[in-house]
Image: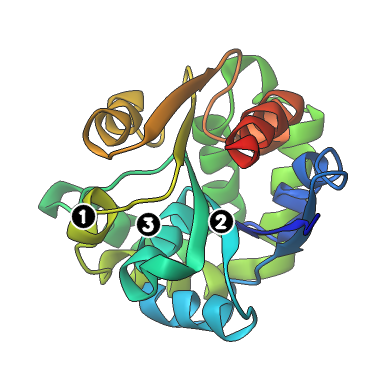
Amino acid sequence: MNRIRLWLLPGMMNTASVWNPVAAQLTDVADISIADLSWQTSIAEMAKSVLAQQQGRFALAGFSMGGYVAQEIVAQAPSRVSHLALLGTSMRPESPEQAGGRKTLLDAVHTDFSALTDKLLMLNLHPARAGDSVPAQAMRTMFEALGPDVFARQIRAIMSRRDTRAGLLAAQMPVAVICGREDRVVPPALSAEIAAQVPNASLTWIEQAGHMMPLEQPSSVASALRELLRE
């Protein structure tokens, strides 16, 4: 039997290590690649770079910013995606309020990157893990590895993304929507909206998790992806 090829797409300021705890639990069912989304200048370019590295059909899981990239891949090449997972993301285009908040982050990124990192750790993680936890340490390491230039480049890419809702709403593949129950970055209602409107979509809540569920609850995330790949 042919094994499924699974591409995992990291979120903003995430290296491949954000997915490593999940990927380690899926090697028996999939051949896994983790995309590098740190060098491109747009969401569309990120999507094209993934498509250029993979022939034929593949399963796709996008976390946070990676969810925007996953939706762009579906828009560009819907027949190539066999299964789709969207984690802690939204199908809505950028709102003026979001753009304003991101501009504030852009202004802060080169002023005091360390303070910004501390602030985002507190926001992204479940309150029980926002201190000196293993997920917090992993997040800090990723931020330090990527640095302020990547932060600014990815913020601008997110702000300039196009509306891909039409492609997602027309999707024919099985879709798993996965969300941390206490996500304070992307409101859980936005995940529920995807599951309610996209055909063939299921919704899985990850308990005791904030936005960074691949680091906070990797076994629960892996279980949800395994269930999707069975379809």
Residues under numbered marks 3 and 1 in contact, where contact means CB atoms less than 8 Å apart: no
Location of residue 96 with respect to 229 vertically, above or below: below
Q: Secondary structure at mark 2?
A: strand
* Residue pointed to by mark 1: 165
* Residue pointed to by mark 3: 105
Expressed as whole percent of the image width and height from the top left, the position of residue 137 reads 78, 40
Expressed as whole percent of the image width and height from the top left, the position of residue 84 reads 49, 49
* Residue pointed to by mark 2: 60
Tell me which residue sits at (47%, 82%) in the image.
48
Q: Is residue 72 visible?
A: yes
Q: Is residue 208 left or right of residue 18?
A: left
Q: Earlier in the sequence, mark 1 or mark 2?
A: 2
Which residue type carries mark 1?
Arg
Gap in Å between the C-alphas at discs 3 and 1?
26 Å
Q: Earlier in the sequence, mark 3 or mark 1?
A: 3
Q: In this view of the protein, which residue sits in the foreground, 158 or 117?
A: 158
